[in-house]
Amino acid sequence: MRLLHPSGSVVHLAYCTNVHPAEDLAGIHEQLSGVAARVRALTGAPVLGLGLWLSSGAARALRADPGELARLRARLDELGLEVVTLNGFPYQGFHDQVVKLRVYRPDWAEPQRLAYTLDLAEILTALLPDDVTEGSISTLPLAWRTGWTPDKAAAVAANLDALTRGLRALAERTGKTIRVGFEPEPGCIVETTPQAVELLAGTDPAHLGVCLDACHLAVGFEEAADAAGLGLPIVKLQVSSAVEAPPGGQRALAAYEEERYLHQTRCAAGYADDLPEALAGGLPADLPWRTHFHMPLHAAPPPPLTTTTPYLEELLGRLMTPDEGLTAPLTRHLEVETYTWSVLPGPVDVAEGIAAELDWTRRRLAALGLKEI
C-alpha cells in the first residue's frame, strides 16, 4: 500500500511474510497466490505491499537463477503485490518447532550473515517497482549479548565495512539504493536505540541505519520521543505491539508461554530472557511486565492483560509528524510484523488477522494526515 504524506513523500505500508513458513521458492509462490492474494482482496488495496522474507536457501536460489528471479517479479506484478522491503533477520528455520536463540545465528561476526544480506540486497534491486529506487532490509542487532568478545567485535566491524562496500557498488551498478536497518532487541548487543547510536557510529548513513520494532522498544521501556530522535537513519518501522501485564496479574501471561520463540520479559527493575524464567520468579510482581510476544494490533488480550498499542500510536505519530509540521516523515517504510499467529492461544484466520492489522494501521495513518494513493 502506498500513502501520501502531507509533505509530498510517499510512505509504503506492507505486511511481513515471515508469518508464513515457506522456506523454498515453491512455497513462496504458494503463499503469494494464497494468503497474500487473499489479504489484498480483504483490504481492497489496489496494490498490497509485502515485507518479503526469504530464507537463506531461497535467497541463494534466486541469486543464482535470474530466470527464477524474473518469474517471482512477474508473479508479484500479476497478483497486485509489491516489494520495497525485505526482512533479513531470520536466516532459516523460522517456523521450526523450537527457534529461540537460534534466530540470532549466524550473527554479524559470521561470513554467512554478510553473504545472505548481500544476496537479499541484489534480489531487492530486481523486485523494486519500476518507479521506486530505494529499498530496505531489516537485520538482527549484530548478535545475542553472550559470547561477545573483542575478536567478535572486530569481525562484526569488518563485515559491516564489507556490507557498506557491497551496497555502494550495488547502487553504482543499478542506480538503486538498498539500506540495511539493524533492529534493536532486548538481550542483544544492540538492545536499545542509544546502543545503536554508539555501535553504529561512523557507519555510512546512506546505506546503514536502524529498523525500529515498536514491540521491542516498548518491552525495553524506551521513550517514543527518544527513539524518534536518536539521530540515525530510520530505515524501517515495524508496526508491532507487545503484551503487558499489570502488577499482580502476571500469571495470566502463562497463556503465552510456548516453546518456539523467545519471549524476553522486562519490568522497570529487571529482566528475564524468556517468559518461563519471569514466571518462575525472575521478576518482581509489584511492577508491570512487558513481554516480547507480538500481539495483533486490532485485538486486545483477555483481561487483566493489555498491549503496548498506545506506545506504538505515539511512536507512529512522532515518526510521521516530526515537529508537528509538514516535515518529511522520519521513515517511509512501515511493516506490520505479527509473526506469532501460529502460537497465539485459540484458533485464528491468518489472512483475516493480517487484513485487520493493516486496516488498523491505515486508520491511524489517515488520522495523521496520510492519504492512500
Image (spheres, grey):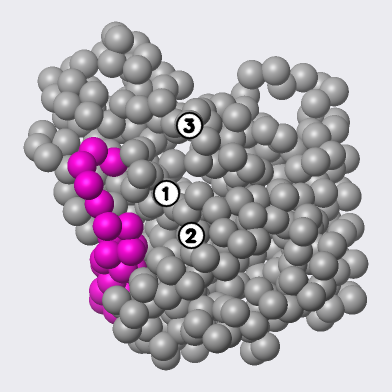
Labels 2, 3: front one: 3
Disc 2 packing (10 Å; few <14; some 14–19; many ≥20): many
- Asked where in the image residue 258 lies, by quadrant, the reply is top left
Q: Are marks 3 and 1 in contact (CB under 8 Å)?
A: no
Q: Mark 2 to mark 1: distance in Å?
A: 8 Å
Find disc 2 in the rendering and name its residue. Answer: 16
- Asked where in the image residue 171 lies, by quadrant, the reply is bottom right
Is there any visible trace of residue 113 in the rendered image? Answer: yes
Q: Mark 3 to mark 1: distance in Å?
A: 14 Å
Q: Are marks 2 and 1 in contact (CB under 8 Å)?
A: yes
Disc 1 packing (10 Å; few <14; some 14–19; many ≥20): many
Q: Disc number at residue 339? A: 1
Q: Main secondary structure of the magenta part?
A: helix
State whether residue 215 is above or below residue 290: below
Q: Mark 2 to mark 3: distance in Å?
A: 20 Å
Q: Of the residues shown, which amino acid type is indicated by label 3? A: Gln
Q: Of the residues shown, which amino acid type is indicated by label 1? A: Tyr
If the image is split into quadrants, where does the N terminus sit?
bottom left
Q: Of the residues shown, which amino acid type is indicated by label 2? A: Cys
The stretch in magenta equals 344-370
Labels 3, 1: front one: 3
